[in-house]
């Protein structure tokens, strides 16, 4: 069985779907600090398959150990963690405690139960403010905010762990900019309040919930002056986790992989594609650059293709179409409901 931490989140939920579709049995853990119990029901509806869900915080060592006692865990895909860059600047100690301490506890429990295979949800934020593109896995690493620092620190912890004990097998997956939604419209990015990311913000403008989008800067050295990023469909990203899992189950050592398309799209290109997909006008205003924003960032994904047999195949049009479909299916977001009790292990004891 595969343990998925943070499996009710945006990327975690899509990865659960792809793992179930690939025939894996999963145990999902989430504390719903930034996710919705209804997502657990929807994963089941999309796949038609049952799985075990445990509502728990990774900082609850006794409860997490209980999962390892009850279930034969073969590997862990570790998504759980706080992820808002701005919030991390405001409450850094909370981010360091939650993201790092929980990972230390998880690794200690894995070691205790001789489960030494992990796929870690990292981020392209570990490359800092580099303007050298395409970004390769051996590019210099740095971070510009506490959230990015937690990803960088966890990567280093896992590298040190692998050095100390070469029986570990770990994949560090560095995501670029995931967008889009499941084709069913049942799963997608469902932020609370004003979104931090570009596409949910665009979708709220297209649906009339927000008046306009702020575009930060139009004087970058790109085709239209707006910043360029590597946007990847969340389903392609999720399939990358399945490929990484397939590898670590039968190998040892630690490797980092970029998960991106290898293409850059400007903010204006994304707006235009979303207008085309939705048939709606997306009004925007040009505002000054934000401190720390860089002009161009996109991945070199060749290592993932070479070693994992993975490549992103969905286009920007696909990403925008599926995102808009999610908005239409869920005009008020995903409503919170009770979890299907058949899927719940309400308390896990030794």
Image (cartoon, rainbow, N blue to C red):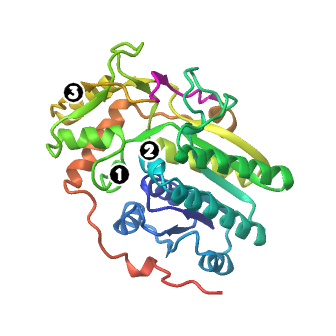
Q: Tell me how far mark 1 sits from mark 3, CA to CA.
A: 26 Å
How packed mark 1 is, by other alpha carbons closer than 10 Å (few <14, some 14-19, many 20 or more), is many
The secondary structure that most of the magenta stretch takes on is: loop
Query: What percent of the width, then of the height, locates residue 22?
Result: 55, 55
Q: Is residue 81 above or below residue 224?
A: below
Specify start and end residues of the magenta stretch as a single range. 292-302
**Which of pointers 1 and 3 indicates the residue nearer the eye?**
3
Would residue 320 be visible to someone looking at this image?
yes
Give yes or no for contact between labels 2 and 3 (Cβ–Cβ under 8 Å): no
Q: Which residue is mark 1?
A: 188
Nearer to us in this view, 57 or 116: 57
What is the quadrant of the C terminus in the image? bottom right
Give yes or no for contact between labels 2 and 1 (Cβ–Cβ under 8 Å): yes
Q: Tell me how far mark 2 sits from mark 1, CA to CA.
A: 9 Å
Q: Which element is circle 1 on? A: loop
- Residue 295 falls inside the magenta stretch: yes
Would residue 322 be visible to someone looking at this image?
no
Q: Which element is circle 3 on? A: strand
What is the quadrant of the N terminus in the image? bottom right
Mark 1 or mark 3, earlier in chain? 1
Query: What percent of the width, then of the height, locates residue 35?
Result: 39, 62
Q: Which residue is mark 2?
A: 234
Mark 2 or mark 1, earlier in chain? 1
**Which of pointers 2 and 3 indicates the residue nearer the eye?**
3
Q: Which residue is mark 3?
A: 285
Give the quadrant of residue 258: top right
Q: Tell me how far mark 2 sits from mark 3, CA to CA.
A: 27 Å
Mark 2 or mark 3, earlier in chain? 2
Query: What percent of the width, then of the height, locates residue 126?
Result: 60, 38
Nearer to us in this view, 84 or 32: 84
How packed mark 2 is, by other alpha carbons closer than 10 Å (few <14, some 14-19, many 20 or more), is many
């Amino acid at each position: 069985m595969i343990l998925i931490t943070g499996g009710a989140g945006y990327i975690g939920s899509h990865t659960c779907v792809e793992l179930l579709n690939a025939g894996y049995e999963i145990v999902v853990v989430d504390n719903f600090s930034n996710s919705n119990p209804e997502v657990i029901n929807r994963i089941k509806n999309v796949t038609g398959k049952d799985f075990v869900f445990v509502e728990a915080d990774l900082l609850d060592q006794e409860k997490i150990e209980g999962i390892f006692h009850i279930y034969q865990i073969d590997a862990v895909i570790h998504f759980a963690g706080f992820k808002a860059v701005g919030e991390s600047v405001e409450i850094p100690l909370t981010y360091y405690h939650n993201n790092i301490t929980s990972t230390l506890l998880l690794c200690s429990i894995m070691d205790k139960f001789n489960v030494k295979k992990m796929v870690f949800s990292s981020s392209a934020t570990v490359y800092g403010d580099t303007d050298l593109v395409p970004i390769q896995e051996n590019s210099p690493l740095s971070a510009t905010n506490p959230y990015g620092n937690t990803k960088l620190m966890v990567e280093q912890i896992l590298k040190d762990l692998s050095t100390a004990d070469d029986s570990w097998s770990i994949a560090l997956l560095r995501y670029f900019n995931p967008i889009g939604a499941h084709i069913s419209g049942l799963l997608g990015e469902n932020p609370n309040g004003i979104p931090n990311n570009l596409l949910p913000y665009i979708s709220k403008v297209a649906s009339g919930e927000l008046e306009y989008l702020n575009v930060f800067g139009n004087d970058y050295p790109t085709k239209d002056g707006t910043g360029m990023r590597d946007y990847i469909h969340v389903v392609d990203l999720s399939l990358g986790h399945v490929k990484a899992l397939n590898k670590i189950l039968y190998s040892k050592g630690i490797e980092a992989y970029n998960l991106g398309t290898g293409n850059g799209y400007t903010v204006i290109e994304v707006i235009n594609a979303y207008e085309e997909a939705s048939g709606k006008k997306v009004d925007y205003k040009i505002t000054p650059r934000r401190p720390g924003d860089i002009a161009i960032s996109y991945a070199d994904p060749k290592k993932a293709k070479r070693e994992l047999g993975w490549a992103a195949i969905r286009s920007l049009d696909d990403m925008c179409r599926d995102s808009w479909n999610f908005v239409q299916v869920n005009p008020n977001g995903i409503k919170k409901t009770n979890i299907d009790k058949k899927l719940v292990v309400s308390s896990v004891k030794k």
